[in-house]
Amino acid sequence: MPRWKDLPDGLDPRVGEFVTRLRRTVDGDGSSLAALADGTGYGRTSWERYLNGRLLAPKGAVIALAEVTGTDPAPLITLWELAERAWSRSELRHDNATEAVHLSRARTVTAPAPAPAPEALAADPPPGPGRRPTRRPTMFLAGALGVVTVAVGAFYLTDGGPAERNRTAAATPTPSATPTRSLPPGVLCAGADCTGKDPEETGCSDGDVTTAASITVGTTLVEVRHSDTCAAAWGRIVRAVQGDTVQVTVGQVRQSGGVTTVGDTIAYTPMVAVKEPGEMRACVELASGERGCT
């Protein structure tokens, strides 16, 4: 069985070249993913995604890999810089395409329904001279009471009394008040279960993810990232430097993250469950002291 999976279809060639070089580096050293995680400080699941082209490895992980395997980091970093630019452009295209699909669905759902027939909207004409007022409400109530009386009588005549009702209720299981949400393979949480968890480790950073809001502070891009699958969002900073931090707030819930390693340029917060991504606010504080919020 091959060690590596085929790279995803449509992966940018520059990203593919970078991932292939990472694989060769790992194969040359002979390290397992578990050993790689222990040596670099980046999780086994993260390395599995990096090496299968599902997630772009951060620069810090690339430098750590070079140190662990005794490889010259310069060629890897050069390939990473090319791959990072291609990956960012690809994410932007994906976000725009996903937003267009959502807008299309919204237009379909809100399309005007057929107007009711004119006769359904017509009101009873006011009583004129010599004309008696309509008695439709009274007639309707009497008719409804008659139907109820007949239904109750039929219920008891067919042995549908209290004993039968109890037997039926006992035979019919009560549905769960909180049905389990069906999640795609690789996704480990949804909604409140995701609060405080890593979007990469739980698979929430894959799939239907959009940038709900963004702002540039200095040269650092601050984003609110939202997973429709996980019903959760998180903050992310790109083109960041060591000491830059990002914080997200939803009501009284806050999560923080930041760049702690020299050479890293991307950092993100743990997730917070949200109904709508607009509920979340992301703020950045740069190492220079400059601040800004979405």
Image (tube, rainbow, N blue to C red):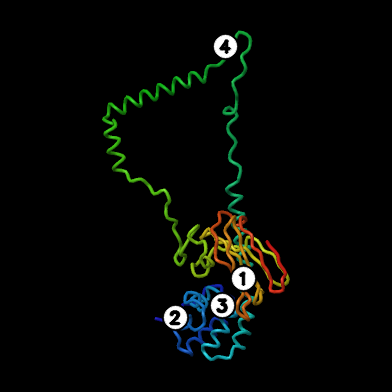
Q: CA distance from mark 4 to mark 1?
A: 74 Å
Question: Is 149 situated above or below 44?
Answer: above
User: SS at mark 1?
Assistant: helix
Q: CA distance from mark 1 to mark 2?
A: 30 Å
Q: CA distance from mark 3 to mark 1?
A: 15 Å
Q: CA distance from mark 2 to mark 4?
A: 89 Å
Count the numbered circles shown: 4
Q: Mark 4 or mark 3, which has the lower sequence index?
A: 3
Q: CA distance from mark 4 to mark 3?
A: 83 Å
Residue at 47% in and 62% down: 189
Instruction: Indicate the amino acid at tag 3.
Output: Ala
Dot 3, how many residues are within 10 Å of its Cα: few (below 14), some (14-19), or many (20+)? many
Residue picked out by circle 2: 34
Q: CA distance from mark 3 to mark 2?
A: 16 Å
Residue at 61% in and 50% down: 107
Judged by depth in the image, the label closer to the viewer, 3 or 2, is 2
Q: Look at the image and tell me in which quarter the N terminus lies.
A: bottom left
Residue picked out by circle 3: 57
Instruction: Indicate the amino acid at tag 4.
Output: Arg
Residue picked out by circle 4: 132
Q: Nearer the viewer, residue 161 or 132?
A: 161
Residue at 61% in and 42% down: 112
Q: Mark 4 or mark 1, which has the lower sequence index?
A: 1
Residue picked out by circle 1: 90
Instruction: Indicate the amino acid at tag 1.
Output: Ser
Q: Look at the image and tell me in which quarter the C terminus lies.
A: bottom right
Q: Nearer the viewer, residue 38 or 114?
A: 38
Which quadrant of the structure image shows residue 290? Answer: bottom right
Q: Nearer the viewer, residue 244 or 151?
A: 244
